[in-house]
């Protein structure tokens, strides 16, 4: 089977052959890909394609969803669909070329929710387009700014060979390599669909972030029967973004983007820059959103703030009109807040870089007794504290090394209460996997499926391919505990998880 993905939420048909796994190495540096999108359930077309992979072994499972990045590989030649010369110009032609990991060979899937998808070139963010909306055989295929045109809408269809055809909605004709050429530079065009292998394509998954676009420092929580995810909006020099967004999901796979819920430049009087690393908690029907932010200009110090709303998707308003914790109050930077609420309903706030500061929150959720603040500095601690409880044991987790380093990773200790005392560092539970091109895995959060011992970890990594410390994407993978209560090292994946 030449699909590089696995079905989501559909069952019942056995595969023709077991999928093979191919990793495509990154090549060029990725620019900012900050597009507004809503991740929706799979279209009928995608679901139909994925049925055939339903019985594939889990080790080979791959997912294809809104936001996935794929190479389109022609079956007859083994070459990749490629925007010629990596042009970013409107109407640049698309041909085939030896696969090399370039962003001009990488296509982001945009699920339109109508049985069709758009395919946007990662280097230009322009869409695969039949020139002039022609319905003629031989009409060339180009890139063009994405629009609502049906000549940019493609149905992914089975061929019966384990490959796919890409059918243009406006014409009903198939994407093919002209004259079935195997040469580099041969142009792509549309033609009446047939059985030729020059019309058959492998969709080779390169990356499948949990939410499309560039996001980091994810905080994942569950309120009621819904999961919510909040993150730093990434892709800005110096991490200078100002906006937070909220995403929700019933199954941890299909996420709805609720848009901007807080803009520190517009909504916070004491900050206008560096909206980082949110955490959230609920009490008595109110939602308390903790974040770090600062002022643009010479003062690079960060403060900890708290905003409040009557919905987990906001809009949020500043709860205090001032920082909850001002820069310089404690050692290190006042960043990376996280909240843990124990079984007795008491909530605890954690924050800091270089040292972890920990304190019970008062019942108003916007204040605490400064005399109760504890500071903890385990070996290799940098930032990103997160705490969970399981079976009476508390797990204190944090990120090590700098977020700009490919060695950014997660370690943990254990304790008998939400504020310790904590053991010495037990070990690393999440780190890079260069065999998959995965780097910079860290600043995580963890969520438990209620009533089960199923746990999931959300974290960021360098965007694939060739992201860096300010171009990061959010992933979700499984987290497992061993029989003795220790945490098993997480296996980071390119494809993510199955839906709940």
Image: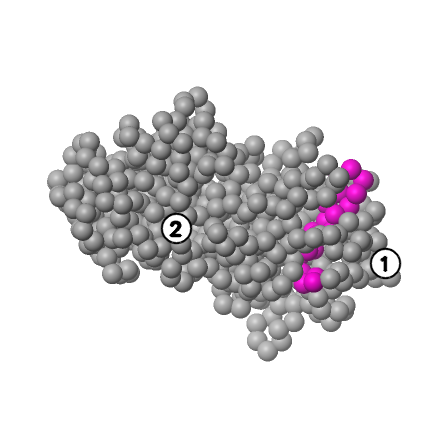
The residue mark sitting in front, 1 or 2, is: 2
Is 412 placed above or below 6 here? below
- Count of marks, rendered view: 2
The residue that disc 2 covers is: 24
Outermost residue toward the right in this view: 371
The residue that disc 1 covers is: 372
Residue at point 36%, 55% (across, down): 101
State yes or no: residue 383 in magenta: yes
Residue 185, percent from left and from top: 19, 54
138 left or right of 199? left
Outermost residue toward the top in this view: 12
Residue 372, percent from left and from top: 85, 58
Residue at point 72%, 44% (across, down): 486
Residue 266 visible in rendering: no
**Nearer to us in this view, 380 or 474:** 380
Magenta-colored segment: predominant secondary structure? strand
Task: Point out the image quarter for the N terminus.
Answer: top left
How far apart marks 1 and 2 lie (CA) works out to 51 Å
Q: Secondary structure at mark 2?
A: loop
100 left or right of 267? left
Is 484 placed above or below 439 here? above
Is the image coloured rainbow, by chain, by secondary structure, or in one colour? one colour
**Nearer to us in this view, 269 or 7:** 7
Magenta highlight range: 380-398
Q: Secondary structure at mark 1?
A: helix
Instruction: Name the N-terminal-most of marks 1 and 2.
Output: 2
Residue 411 visible in rendering: yes
**Nearer to us in this view, 461 or 252:** 461
């Amino acid at each position: 089977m030449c699909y590089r993905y696995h079905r989501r939420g559909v069952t019942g048909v056995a595969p023709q052959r077991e999928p093979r796994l191919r990793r495509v190495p990154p090549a060029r540096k990725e620019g900012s890909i900050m597009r507004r999108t809503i991740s929706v359930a799979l279209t009928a077309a995608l679901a139909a394609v994925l049925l055939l992979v339903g019985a594939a072994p889990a080790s080979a499972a791959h997912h294809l969803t809104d936001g996935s990045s794929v190479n389109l590989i022609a079956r007859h030649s083994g070459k990749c669909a490629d925007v010629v010369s990596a042009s970013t110009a409107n109407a640049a032609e698309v041909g085939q070329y030896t696969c090399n990991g370039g962003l001009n060979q990488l296509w982001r899937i945009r699920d339109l929710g109508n049985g069709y998808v758009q395919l946007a070139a990662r280097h230009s963010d322009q869409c695969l387009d039949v020139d002039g909306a022609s319905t003629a055989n031989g009409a060339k295929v180009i890139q063009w700014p994405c629009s609502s045109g049906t000549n940019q809408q493609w149905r992914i269809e089975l061929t019966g060979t384990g490959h796919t055809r890409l059918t243009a909605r406006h014409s009903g004709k198939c994407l093919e390599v002209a004259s079935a050429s195997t040469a580099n530079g041969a142009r792509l065009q549309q033609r009446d669909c047939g059985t030729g292998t020059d019309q058959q394509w492998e969709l080779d998954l390169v990356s499948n972030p949990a939410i499309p676009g560039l996001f980091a420092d994810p905080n994942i929580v569950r309120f009621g029967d819904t999961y919510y995810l909040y993150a730093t909006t990434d892709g800005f020099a110096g991490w200078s973004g100002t906006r937070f967004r909220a995403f929700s999901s019933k199954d941890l796979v299909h996420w709805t983007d609720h848009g901007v819920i807080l803009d520190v430049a517009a909504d916070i009087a004491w900050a206008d820059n560096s909206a980082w690393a949110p955490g959230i908690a609920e009490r008595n029907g109110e939602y308390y959103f903790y974040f770090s932010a600062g002022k643009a200009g010479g003062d690079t110090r960060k403060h900890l703030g708290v905003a409040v709303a009557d919905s987990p998707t906001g809009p949020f308003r500043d709860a205090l009109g001032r920082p909850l914790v001002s820069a310089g109050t404690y050692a290190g930077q006042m960043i990376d807040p996280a909240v843990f609420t124990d079984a007795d309903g008491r909530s605890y706030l954690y924050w800091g870089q270089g040292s972890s500061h920990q304190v019970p929150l008062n019942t108003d959720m916007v204040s605490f007794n400064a005399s109760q603040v504890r500071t903890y500095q385990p070996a290799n601690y940098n930032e990103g504290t997160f705490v969970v409880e399981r079976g009476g044991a508390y797990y204190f987790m944090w990120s090590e090394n700098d977020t700009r380093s490919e060695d950014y990773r997660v370690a943990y200790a254990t304790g008998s209460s939400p504020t310790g005392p904590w053991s010495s560092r037990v070990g690393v539970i999440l780190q890079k996997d260069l065999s998959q091109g995965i780097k910079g895995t860290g600043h995580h959060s963890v969520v438990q499926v209620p009533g089960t011992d199923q746990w999931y970890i959300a974290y960021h990594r360098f965007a694939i391919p060739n992201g860096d410390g300010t171009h990061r994407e959010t992933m979700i993978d499984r987290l497992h505990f061993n029989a003795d209560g220790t945490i098993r090292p997480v296996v980071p994946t390119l494809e993510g998880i199955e839906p709940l």
